[in-house]
Amino acid sequence: MRDGGGASGPGEGPDPGALLAWYDRHARALPWRVPPGAAHRAEPYRVWLSEIMLQQTTVPAVKPYFEAFTTRWPTVEALAAAQDAEVMAAWAGLGYYARARNLLKCARVVAGERGGRFPDSAEGLRELPGIGPYTAGAVAAIAFDRPEPVVDGNVERVMARLYDIDEPLPGAKAEMKARAAELTPRARPGDYAQGVMDLGATICTPRSPACGICPWREPCLARARGTQAERPVPAPKKAKPTRHGIAYAGRREDGAWLLETRPDKGLLGGMLGWPGSDWADAPPEPAPPAEAEWRETGVEARHTFTHFHLRLEVLVAELPMGAEPARGRFQPLNPKDLPTLMRKVHAIAAAALRHD
DNA sequence: AATGCGTGGAA
DNA sequence: TTTCCAAGCAT
């Protein structure tokens, strides 16, 4: 690492000071952020919460969830005291649900074993559930002013272009990380980290980067060579198979739906869902969760996950008050508490049962 | 080290 | 419609 200072120029390598000067003028205003130059730093709880939500997730998607969480649970102690089901329901729709399970685990460790104080070093933060190298560095830098390297997808893209790294991902990550680390300044590490990420989000974007207004345009090797659109070189991608299954949407006379909480491990772990068959490459075997006249809706719920497409056939039934299902539990339902796939099933089922 | 794990918006 | 991808982590 080195100190920032002078201006960037050709042949001199990128200057952290130029990036900080750009950030002072162009920092995005975000709900979890304290503007550069403010007299105080952001609260560790809010920095941590935002960083967990932002993992592989866009800023527009995170904003309403961050607002909802901080309003409902203003402190780590409040979050730690929440019920599992209410936190999972509040996270529903944001995706990567292991984050929510680890969020609660982490909150309970911090509140229960650390007096509500987050560790103030990257090394300490790294021990907590759901906090990996990136998040540990980000919280240490932003909340505690520690000069830690903070390497996310934005930073990797910026490094790939600054140094015109032509090795494909993910092999190139080691060099990207080394370049990012040697560039990280001792001064204002939190602003610097947020600055590089803002640069990646607004100027050095994946497609059509705005090189003409970039504070690092002069030292950028890819810009000089015209290769910026081809950096970073992506990893080879695999085809997504299509899997099939059956979902059973049962509604009792009182309006309660037959739902089950999915096991913690695996896809949509810990979330509410409809009982059903396994999801497999072959046509699914029927697996009704209760004895009833299950009726085909003729509509499939289609959904794409990270690594496969899914088509779920939706079956519906009206169940009597005395029904004793083999699987699941009757409960009142707010569809917003369901992950997106299960919301799609609900919409199909509700429409089918409406036309009786 | 490679794989599993969500979602919605943009092109 | 399909593809791509966005502030990664756990195993």
Image (spheres, coloured by chain):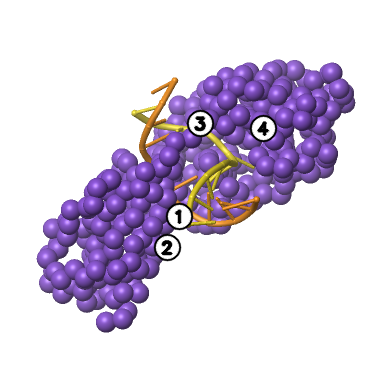
Chain colours: A purple, B orange, C yellow
Q: Earlier in the sequence, mark 3 or mark 2?
A: 3
Residue at 58% across, 47% down: A58
* Residue holding disc 3: A236
Q: Residues within 10 Å of mark 4 (few under 14, many from 20)?
A: some
Q: Earlier in the sequence, mark 4 or mark 1?
A: 1
Q: Earlier in the sequence, mark 4 or mark 3?
A: 4
Residue A302 appears in the picture as rendered: yes
Marks 3 and 2 sit apart, C-alpha to C-alpha, by 36 Å
* Residue holding disc 1: A93
Question: In the rendered structure, are the residues bearing label 1 and label 2 in contact, judged by CB atoms less than 8 Å apart?
Answer: yes
Decide if residue A151 is on the left or right side of residue A209. Answer: left
Q: Can you give x and y, in whole percent of width and height, for residue A91 in the image?
A: 44, 52
Marks 4 and 3 sit apart, C-alpha to C-alpha, by 14 Å
Q: Residues within 10 Å of mark 2 (few under 14, many from 20)?
A: some
* Residue holding disc 4: A230
Q: Can you give x and y, in whole percent of width and height, for residue A86 in the image?
A: 38, 55
Residue at 25% across, 66% down: A315
Q: Amino acid at mark 1?
A: Gly
Question: What element does badge 4 sit on?
Answer: helix
The subunit carrying tag 3 is A
Question: In the rendered structure, are the residues bearing label 3 and label 2 in contact, judged by CB atoms less than 8 Å apart?
Answer: no
**Tag shown at residue A102:** none
Decide if residue A66 is on the left or right side of residue A147. Answer: left
Q: Earlier in the sequence, mark 1 or mark 3?
A: 1
Instruction: Identify the image quadrant of the C terminus of chain A.
Output: bottom left
Marks 1 and 2 sit apart, C-alpha to C-alpha, by 8 Å
Please tell me if label 4 and label 2 are on a single chain. yes
The subunit carrying tag 2 is A
Residue at 45% across, 27% down: A127
* Residue holding disc 2: A336
Q: Nearer the viewer, mark 4 or mark 2?
A: 4
